[in-house]
Amino acid sequence: MNDLPQQLANGLLLGALYGLIAIGYTMVYGIVQLINFAHGEIFMIGGFGALTAFLILPTGTSLLIALPVMILMAMACSVLVAMGAERFAYRPLRGAPRLAPLITAIGLSIALQQAIWAFYPDAKKARPFPEFEGPRFDLGAFTIGRGDLFLLIAAPVCMIALGVFVSKTRTGRAMQATSQDPDTAKLMGINTDRIIVTAFAIGAAFAAIAAVAHGLRYGNVDFRMGFIAGLKAFTAAVLGGIGNIYGAMIGGLVLGLAEAMATAYIENIPGMSQLGGGAWKDVWAFVLLILVLLLRPQGLLGQRVADRA
Amino acid sequence: MRHRSLFIITTAVTAGALTLSACGSRGDSDGGSSGGGDTTTVVIGLDAPLSGDLSALGQGIKNSADLAVKTANKNKEVPGVTFKLEPLDDVAQAATGQQNATKLVGDSKVMGVVGPLNSDVGQSMQKVFDSANLALVSPANTNPSLTQGKDWQTGKKVRGSKTYFRTSTTDAVQGPFAARYMYNKKKLKKVYVIDDKKTYGAGLAATFAGEFKKLGGTVVGTDHINPEDKDFSAVASKVAEAKADFVYYGGEYPAGAPLASQIKNAGAKIPTVGGDALFSAEYVKLAKKNAEGDIASSVGAPLETLDTAKKFIADYDAAGYKDAYEAYGGYAYDSAWAIIQAVKAVVEGNDGKLPESKDARGKVVAALQDVTFDGVSGSVGFDEFGDTTNRQLSLYEVKDGKHVAVEVGKFEG
C-alpha cells in the first residue's frame, strides 16, 4: 500500500478530467433535459483545435507561451461546434419527442468523429501533442507530471468561476430559472434560446480546457478519444446527480478514484486476484455507479425532481 | 416554414453523415476488368488496417503488395496474366475483416489475398477463405494457433485452415526469443507482464512469460489493460511499486507507447519490451523521449541488412509511396510474390492459360504449398501447417529516437 498517495493522486487527476467534461453533460441536461452524446466529440475537437494552434505557431515557441493561444483556439473550436450543433441539430427538434434529439446526438457524435478522421491531416492515427519537458514534481509521497499542474490549477479555478457565474450573475440566475421552469422563465422575459446556447457554450469551453489538459497529460490526441472520455464523463455526471454542476465534479472525482483504486488494490483482496487490475477497473467503476443509483437514484448531489415529460 | 426547411436540411445532413460513416471501407470499385488484347486479369486481394491507429503498418503492407504487383506486371512475370491489387480496409476490426473476406471471395477474379495484419482479424477471415478454397497469405499474423490449432502448446498440432499461409514467424518463437535475450544478455531477472487481452497480445505475453520463468526469471506482477484507454497511470504506479527490472507488453503500439511513457513518468526508469506490433516509428513518435531504451522484437532479419531486400528498398523509394514500408513491408511483398509465383505455376501447368475460376483457386492453393523463392525477407517457403520455413528473428532497441537492431538470430525450439 506504499503507493497509496500516488494512486490517490492518479485517481484525483483522472477524476478532475472527467469532472471538467461532465460539466457539459450536466449543464445541458439541467436546462433542456437532453443528454448531449456528442459532447465527447466536442471535447475531442477541442484537442485538435489546441494542436492546430500549436502547429500554426512558429516551431520553437515555448509551450508556456503557446499554451494560452492553444486554450483559446481549443475553446473557439469547441464552442463553435457546440453552438452549431445546438442551432442546427437540436433546436429544430425542440419539442419533438425526447428520443429524436437523443438519436440526433448519437448521429452527430459519429459525424463529428468521422469528419476529423477524414479531413484533419494525418488524424487517422493518434497525433502527438506537445508536452512540458523536464522532470516531474516530487511532492514527497507522490509525484505529478508537469502537464498535470495545468489540470490541477484549471479544474478548481473553472469550478469556482462557474459557481460564481451561476449564482451571482444575471445570466447565471436566468439559467437557474430556465432550468427550473422554462415556460415561466420565458414569460418573465428571459430569452431562453440565448440561455440554452450559453449552456452549450460553457459546457464546450470546459470540455476544451479538459482537452488541453488531456493532451498535456497523455501526450497525444486522436479522433476516437472523445468516445471513452465522453462515456466516463456522462457516468460521472449521473453519479454526481445530473443537472447539478458540483455533482458533476464530485462524480468525476469519485469515478476517477474508484478506477485507480480498483486497478491498484482489488487484486490484493484474497480470492479476488482474477477480478482486479486494469482490465476490471471499468467493471468496478460501474458497480459503484449502480450501487449509488440504488441507494440514491438522484445521484450524489442531485435533487429529487418530478419528471416534467 | 423557415423552421421546417431548417429541419429538413439538418436531417439530411445528419443522415448523410451517418451514411458516410457507415460505409467505412473505401475499396475501389472494380476498375479495369480485362484490358486490351487477350490477357487475363488476376486480382490479388489485400486486407489490412488502412485507417485507424494501426494504419502506419497497414499502409506499409498495402504499398509493398502494390509494388510486388507492379513489378510482376512490368516484368511480365506470368505471360498473358495481368495482376491487379484490390486493397480493402479492415480498421483492425475482426468483423470488418470478415466482411472484406466475403467480398473478396465473391469476386471470381480474386486468386489470392494478402493480409491481414491482426491475428484476431486473421482468425475471423480464415473460415471464409477455407470454405471458398481461396488462398490467404498473411505478412503479419503471429498467433501460433492460426496455423497449428488451438492446442499447439500441448504438442497436438492440427492445421487450422488448408488455405492459410503466412510469411511471418509466430509468437511461439517471438516471445521466447525476447525472453532469452532479456535474461541471458541483459541480465534482467524481474519482469512485470502486461497485455491487452487480444488474441495477439495475450498470446504473446503468455509465450514470453512461460519461457522467462523456465529460464529462472521472476514475474513480479501481471496486469491487463484496455487498449482503447488513454490513462494507464494507475497501472504505471503499480509497476513502479513492484520494482521490476523491465516490463513486457503484449499488445500494439497505440496503447503500448502511452503505457511505456506513463510507466517511465511514474518513476520506474525501466525499459518496456514487446513484440513486432511495437516495432514502428509511430511508437517513438507517441512515447517521444520516453521511448529511449525500449525494445521490440520483430520477425525476420532487419531488411536493411539483407542483400535480397536492397532492391526492394530501392524500388519502394523510387515508387514514391507516401508512407514507409514499416515492419511488415518486406513480408507483404513476399506474400504477394508467393501468390504471383503460385499463379505462375498454375498457368504454366495448364498450357499457359488460367483454368476455370473454381479449379484455379484450388490449384493456386496447392501450388502455394510448394512455392519457394528468395524473397525480400530471405528464403520464402511454407511448411505443412502453412507457417514460413524462415525462422529469423531480431530485436530492436530505441536509441536516439530510432529502432536499432541489437540482436539478430534464429530461434531453435
Image (spheres, coloured by chain):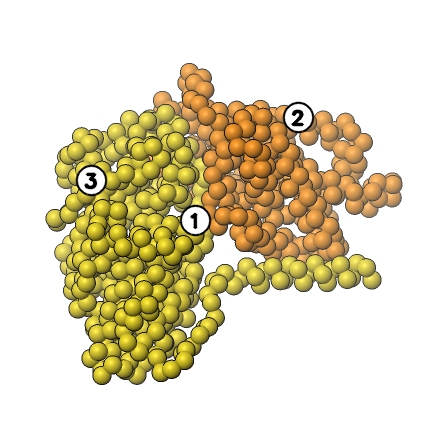
Chain colours: A orange, B yellow
Depicted A10 relative to depicted B114: above or below: above
Residue type at mark 2 is Ile
Q: Mark 3 lies on which chain?
A: B
Query: Within 10 angstroms of label 3, few (less than 14), some, or many (20 or more) residues?
Result: some
Q: Is residue B381 left or right of residue A206?
A: left
Q: Tell me what residue is drawn at x 87 percent, y 41 percent.
A: A189
Instruction: In the displayed orientation, state which residue is furthest to the left.
Output: B412
Q: Is residue A88 visible?
A: yes
Q: How many labels does the image show?
A: 3
Disc 2/disc 1 C-alpha distance (Å): 38 Å
Q: Residue at x 83, y 42 (%)?
A: A191
Q: Residue A160 carries which label?
A: 2
Judging depth in this view, the residue of B193 and A57 nearest the camera is: A57
Q: Residue B53 got which mark?
A: 1
Whether the residues at callouts 2 and 1 have beta carbons within 8 Å, the answer is no
* CA–CA distance in space, label 3 to label 1: 28 Å
C-alpha span from label 3 to label 2 = 56 Å
Please give the name of the residue rendered at 79% of the width and 45% of the height, measured from the top-left corner: A193
The chain to which mark 2 is attached is A
Front disc: 3 or 1: 3
Q: Position of residue B354 (x, y in %)?
A: 28, 80
Asked if marks 3 and 2 fall on the same chain, the answer is: no
